Amino acid sequence: MICYGDEAHITNIAVDPMLQGHGIAQRLLHDQLLVAKEMGGRAVSLEVRVTNWRAQRVYARFGFHPVGIRRNYYAELHEDALIMWTDDIRDAAYRRRLDAIVASLPDGIRPA
Ligand SMILES: CC(C)(COP(=O)(O)OP(=O)(O)OC[C@H]1O[C@@H](n2cnc3c(N)ncnc32)[C@H](O)[C@@H]1OP(=O)(O)O)[C@@H](O)C(=O)NCCC(=O)NCCS
C-alpha cells in the first residue's frame, strides 16, 4: 500500500493458493485500512482485473465500489482494470463495517 496525503492506494494483495478461503485477505485488508487511517488516509483506491470476481467480492465487502475502467491496464493479459474506491474510512460507519468483518473471521485469523 502507498499512502500519499489523505489518499492511500493498495498496490497488491495475494494469499498462497493453499491457504485461500480462510479470511486471510480480509484480515490483511482490515489491517491495511487501519494503517491507512492512522497515516491520515481518508479514502483508499485499488485496481483489479475486471474478471477477478473473487477479489472484487472481497473488496466490495470492505466498501470498495467501482468508479471507472482503465483500458488494457494489464497489457500482457489484454485485460482492463476496474478502479475501485472506498468512501471516507474515517467515518464511524466505516469503523463499524470493519468491526463486523473482523468479528466474522475464524479464530486464529481474527485479530486478538
Ligand atoms: C483475492 C485473494 C487475495 C483472496 O484471498 P483469500 O484469503 O482467499 O480471501 P478471504 O478468505 O478473505 O475471502 C475469500 C472468500 O473466502 C470466504 N471465507 C473466508 N473465511 C472463510 C471460512 N472460514 N470458511 C469458508 N469461507 C471463508 C470469504 O467469505 C470469501 O468468500 P467470497 O468468495 O464469497 O467473497 C486471493 O484469492 C488471491 O491471492 N488471489 C490471487 C491474487 C489476486 O488476485 N489478488 C488481487 C489482485 S487485485
Image (spheres, rainbow, N blue to C red):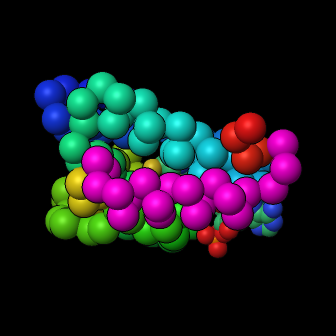
Coordinates of residue 92 in the picture (x, y in percent): 35, 57
Q: Nearer the viewer, residue 4 or 76?
A: 4
* Furthest residue in direction left, as rendered: 5
Relative to 96, 64 lies left or right? left
Residue pictured at 29% horizontal, 48% vertical: 90
Q: Would you place residue 36 above or below residue 47 in this image? A: above
Residue pictured at 33% horizontal, 36% vertical: 37
Residue pictured at 24% horizontal, 47% vertical: 43
What residue span does the magenta drawing correspond to? Answer: 89-108
Relative to 86, 51 lies left or right? right
Q: Would you place residue 89 above or below residue 82 in this image? A: above
Q: Nearer the viewer, residue 5 or 11?
A: 5
Q: Nearer the viewer, residue 55 or 7?
A: 7
Q: Is residue 83 visible?
A: no
Residue pictured at 52% horizontal, 45% vertical: 29
Relative to 23, 93 lies left or right? left
Where does ligand 1 appear, by image quarter? bottom right
Q: Nearer the viewer, residue 95 or 11?
A: 95
Which corner quadrant holds the C terminus?
A: top right
Q: Is residue 57 visible?
A: yes
Magenta residues, dominant SS class: helix
Which corner quadrant holds the N terminus?
A: top left
Q: Is residue 81 magenta?
A: no
* Furthest residue in direction front, as rendered: 92
Coordinates of residue 65 in the picture (x, y in percent): 30, 68
Coordinates of residue 100 in the picture (x, y in percent): 58, 63
